[in-house]
């Protein structure tokens, strides 16, 4: 098979690595790709939002299956464009990708179908939002309705912070049109868990659990980012919690989308909060999480191509989805100053240290080639992942591997997976 992967980050690198393991695959392309993905795929200089050019390329190269890694093209309707041209593609159609594309839609869906989530109100008028805040319980959460690179969520501890947040999202348009509508949500506490799942429109098969670390600094301080590291599985995600989620969250979400005439085929990412009142949905995503994919896919035993095709064909119930009985930890190496201002173009040393080392992986997020060297080309530069017999071993291995790599403004959190010490 010939495969085209769309995207350019650590998630797409992890997907390319996993796809390359399938004996069914003979050739992989990635558009636009990055310096690390080149190890497994031929990178093509076509942007992820250039739907017509991507479809034309897929036809020209007789691509058997296109895998869309990123949220923007999914929400923008790339699957519909490909399907209209008779091309086989993995991912939800536009009317299903709205599950991620609009937080207001997803919250309303959960309310309508009784799926556990935090109490909320949606606002398209800034004055109405500000008036609501006057009587709201603090702390409170503000969410830009649309896509905001994982950064459109503000936790406000005071009324002044909340007022400033509404101004930032709705009036100053910090997140562009994503802030045309704002969701004001009850602040809930507990352990956060991410569960990625494969869906074929009616059947859902959850993957192993993971936990992301969103804040830029140690101890969950600093600004929200796209993710500074992950571990899998979560020791807080018990068998009992899984059974509750299957019954009250996972299958009901799939059934709700089908009932709304928006059958979902692809990946639903469930961002969960394990509250004292039980698990609640914080958010949905319509694709692999990043960096969650970088710890989940190295633990997956099943051929990923078989799973992708079953999701498209509606035969996911025939797939035996298996994961290794081990653990994985990913530490993101970022450019100092991320997510605000940072330097690019700095030479990266030590990548060859991963060659031939079983259980150690380095997934490229923001890298490029310059004068024969691999250089930094983004805020999140690399995801260093290691497996181990358990979480503590995987964490020790990951931080050991972090030291193998150097670049001038290397920055990372030192406490990824520290929560496992409390389990």
Image (cartoon, rainbow, N blue to C red):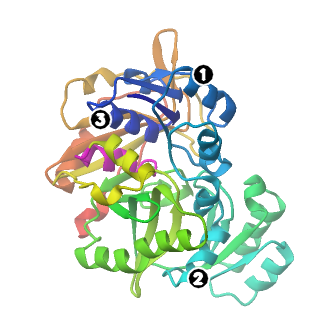
Residue 332 falls in image quadrant = top left
Q: Position of residue 248 (x, y in %)?
A: 41, 80
Q: Position of residue 257 (x, y in %)?
A: 55, 69
Relative side of 24 to 258, left or right: left
Sequence-wise, which precedes: disc 2 or disc 3? 2
Relative side of 199 to 143, left or right: left
The quadrant of the rendering that contains the N terminus is top left
- As helix, strand or loop, the secondary structure at mark 1 comes to loop
In the image, residue 226 lies in the stretch drawn in magenta = no
Say which of 337 and 169 sits in front: 169
Say the numbered circle drawn on residue 78: none
In the image, residue 295 lies in the stretch drawn in magenta = yes
Q: Position of residue 20 (x, y in %)?
A: 32, 30
Q: Is residue 210 above or below residue 8?
A: below
Residue at the image point whose x is 52% and y is 85% from the top = 114
Say the numbered circle drawn on residue 361: 3
Q: Is residue 108 above or below residue 300?
A: below
The reply to whether discs 3 and 1 touch (Cβ–Cβ < 8 Å) is no
Relative side of 92 to 145, left or right: left
Marks 3/1: CA distance? 25 Å
Say which of 13 and 200 sits in front: 200
Sequence-wise, which precedes: disc 3 or disc 1? 1
Q: Position of residue 5 (x, y in %)?
A: 48, 34
Q: Which residue matches tag 1? A: 45
Say which of 366 and 405 sits in front: 366
The reply to whether discs 2 and 3 touch (Cβ–Cβ < 8 Å) is no
Residue at the image point whose x is 66% and y is 37% from the top = 49
**Residue, far left:** 389
Marks 2/3: CA distance? 41 Å
Q: Which range is magenta?
A: 289-302
């Amino acid at each position: 098979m010939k495969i085209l992967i769309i995207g350019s980050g650590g998630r797409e690198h992890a997907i390319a690595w996993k796809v390359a393991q399938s004996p069914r695959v003979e050739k992989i392309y990635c558009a636009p790709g990055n310096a690390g993905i080149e190890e497994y795929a031929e990178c093509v200089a076509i942007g992820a939002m250039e739907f017509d050019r991507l479809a034309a390329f897929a036809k020209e190269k007789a691509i058997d299956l296109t895998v869309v890694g990123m949220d923007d093209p999914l929400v923008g309707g790339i699957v519909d464009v490909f399907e209209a041209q008779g091309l086989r593609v993995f991912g939800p159609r536009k009317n299903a990708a709205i599950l991620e594309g609009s937080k207001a839609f997803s919250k309303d869906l959960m309310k309508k179908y009784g799926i556990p989530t935090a109490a909320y109100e949606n606002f398209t008028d800034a004055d109405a939002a500000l008036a609501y805040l006057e009587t709201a319980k603090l702390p409170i959460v503000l969410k830009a309705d649309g896509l905001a690179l994982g950064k459109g969520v503000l936790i406000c501890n005071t009324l002044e912070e909340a007022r400033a947040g509404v101004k930032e999202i709705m009036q100053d348009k910090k997140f562009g049109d994503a802030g045309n509508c704002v969701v004001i949500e009850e602040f809930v506490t507990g352990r956060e868990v991410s569960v990625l799942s494969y869906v074929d429109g009616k059947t859902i098969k959850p993957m192993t659990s993971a936990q992301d670390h969103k804040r830029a600094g140690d101890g969950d301080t600093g600004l929200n980012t796209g993710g500074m590291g992950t571990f899998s599985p979560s020791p807080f995600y018990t068998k009992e919690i899984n059974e509750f989620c299957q019954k009250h969250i996972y299958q009901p979400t799939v059934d709700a989308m089908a009932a709304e005439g928006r059958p979902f085929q692809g990946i639903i990412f469930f961002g969960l909060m394990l509250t004292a009142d039980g698990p609640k949905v914080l958010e949905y995503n319509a694709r692999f999480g990043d960096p969650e994919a970088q710890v989940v896919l190295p633990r997956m035993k099943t051929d990923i191509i078989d799973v992708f095709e079953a999701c498209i064909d509606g035969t996911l119930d025939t797939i035996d989805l298996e994961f290794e009985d081990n653990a994985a930890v990913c530490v993101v190496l970022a450019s100092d100053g991320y997510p605000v201002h940072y330097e690019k173009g700095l030479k990266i040393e030590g990548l060859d240290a991963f060659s031939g080392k079983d259980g150690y992986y380095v997934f490229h997020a923001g890298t490029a080639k310059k004068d024969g060297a691999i250089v930094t080309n983004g805020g999140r530069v690399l995801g260093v992942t290691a497996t181990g017999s358990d979480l503590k071993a995987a964490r020790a291995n990951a931080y050991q591997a972090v030291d193998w790599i150097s670049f001038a403004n290397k920055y990372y959190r030192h406490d990824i997976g520290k929560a496992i010490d409390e389990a």
